[in-house]
């Protein structure tokens, strides 16, 4: 038996479900509208805040600008340089808007600070690099062109009186005195200054050049003149490194750095007159360098080597006997050219040099910088070097052989 549902009851169910759907949709739309309204209200509040902020900054900018102009006008007391202060602003910055300028108004308005006579202290210089960047390496050395002091001086405008130079852009590790024993070698000195000043400047060295001139025509004494140079250079500046160089030796590579090392340094290890080879293992002649501490440790150089030869071997003995070793550059870098010349008068080979070299251990404590005597005659500063003229005495009479 089948059940018949009345049509009116079905219609009631349909109408009630439709009403529920419409009610839910309406509530959803109401919530959406309220959310949109809240977002609009929040957006409006943010815009108002930004507007008033920009307006305030703009008002502050122009008020400061006007106050600055009025203040400068009140200080006018004469022509240019006597009170006028005009401020100009560059408003032509690419891709900028007025708002961006207004937002950075604090940067546009110059700060007014009381004028003082104090100058800002310079920034400390960085230390000079161990290997300077301006070195060129192997150099072409020749002595055929005519050389004058005027030319050398023009080539080195940054060298000050006395042959002094300090790097302007960094702080050197060493303060170096370069000491040259000298007599009657004016032409050699021109070439030496011509080549060495540019090399030393590229090496970023704080240095001074001292020519120790032996007056008179008595027997030449190279090592004693070097002791004099050490003593006189310290009167001029607080040097802590000393380079002792013959005036006729020119380095062929600027990577052969003229400063002091942990051990006494022999620079001229490969001269052209020796076929660019070290003549023997104990050779310490030509160009050498010692720190102040190393120099005092060996009591300086011997004073009793009159004439040519022997003093450099004595110095080598002093170094090894005091527990130090000689350091040397690479043979490809320590190359030197010698200016050819005849042997100087009154600088003949010393016949006693071999006996003296064998007795270094017994003589080095009493013969050296501690026993140095000389008479200072003149100190004169030239544009490229300091000349120190001295009298160092005469050699003792040789024992008579009968």
Image (cartoon, rainbow, N blue to C red):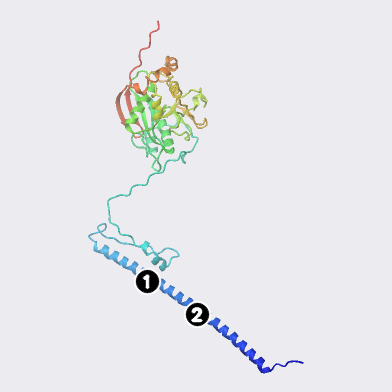
Above/below status of 295 relative to 401: below
* Viewer-nearest residue: 260 or 93: 260
Q: Secondary structure at mark 1?
A: helix
The disc label shown at residue 131, or none = none
Q: Which residue is mark 2?
A: 34
C-alpha gap between disc 2 and disc 1:
31 Å
Indicate which disc, 2 or 1, sits on the residue closer to the N terminus.
Answer: 2
Whole-percent x, y for residue 212 in the image = 35, 26
Q: Which residue is mark 1?
A: 55
Give the mark toward the camera: 2 or 1.
2
Q: Residues within 10 Å of mark 2 (few under 14, many from 20)?
A: few
Q: Is residue 263 visible?
A: yes
Whole-percent x, y for residue 111 in the image = 32, 60
**In which quadrant of the rendered view does residue 231 lie?**
top left
User: Number of marks in the image?
Assistant: 2
**In which quadrant of the rendered view does residue 103 lie?**
bottom left
Q: Residue at x 45, y 77 (%)?
A: 41
Quadrant assignment for the C terminus: top left
Q: Are marks 2 and 1 in contact (CB under 8 Å)?
A: no
């Amino acid at each position: 038996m089948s059940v018949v549902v009345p049509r009116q009851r079905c219609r009631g169910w349909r109408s009630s479900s439709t009403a529920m759907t419409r009610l839910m949709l309406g509530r959803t739309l109401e919530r959406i509208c309220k959310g949109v309204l809240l977002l609009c209200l929040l957006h409006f509040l943010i815009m108002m805040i930004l507007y008033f902020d920009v307006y305030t900054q703009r008002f502050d900018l122009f008020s400061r600008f006007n106050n600055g102009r009025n203040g400068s006008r009140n200080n006018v007391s004469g022509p240019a340089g006597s009170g006028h202060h005009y401020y100009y602003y560059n408003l032509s910055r690419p891709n900028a808007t007025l708002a961006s300028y207004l937002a950075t108004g604090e940067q546009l308005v110059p700060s007014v600070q009381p004028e003082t006579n104090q100058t800002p202290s310079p920034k400390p210089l960085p230390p000079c690099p161990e290997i300077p960047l301006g070195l060129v390496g192997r150099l072409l050395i020749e002595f055929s062109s005519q050389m004058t002091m005027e030319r050398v001086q023009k080539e080195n405008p940054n060298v000050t009186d006395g042959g002094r130079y300090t790097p302007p852009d960094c702080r050197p590790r060493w303060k170096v005195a370069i000491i040259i024993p000298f007599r009657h070698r004016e032409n050699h000195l021109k070439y030496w200054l011509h080549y060495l000043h540019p090399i030393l400047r590229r090496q970023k060295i704080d240095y001074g050049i001292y020519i120790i001139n032996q007056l008179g025509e008595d027997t030449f004494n190279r090592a004693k003149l070097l002791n004099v140079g050490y003593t006189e250079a310290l009167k001029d500046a607080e040097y802590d490194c000393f380079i002792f160089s013959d005036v006729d030796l020119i380095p062929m590579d600027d990577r052969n750095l003229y400063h002091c090392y942990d051990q006494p340094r022999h620079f001229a290890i490969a001269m052209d007159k020796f076929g660019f080879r070290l003549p023997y293992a104990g050779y310490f002649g030509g160009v050498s360098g010692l720190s102040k501490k190393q120099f005092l440790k060996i009591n300086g150089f011997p004073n009793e080597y009159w004439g040519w030869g022997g003093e450099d071997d004595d110095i080598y003995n002093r170094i090894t006997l005091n527990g130090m070793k000689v350091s040397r550059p690479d043979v490809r870098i320590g190359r030197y050219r010698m200016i050819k010349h005849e042997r100087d008068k009154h600088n003949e080979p010393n016949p006693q040099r071999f006996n003296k070299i064998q007795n270094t251990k017994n003589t080095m404590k009493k013969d050296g910088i501690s026993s140095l005597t000389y008479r200072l005659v003149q100190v004169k500063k030239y544009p490229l070097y300091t000349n120190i003229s001295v009298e160092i005495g005469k050699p003792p009479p040789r024992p008579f052989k009968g």
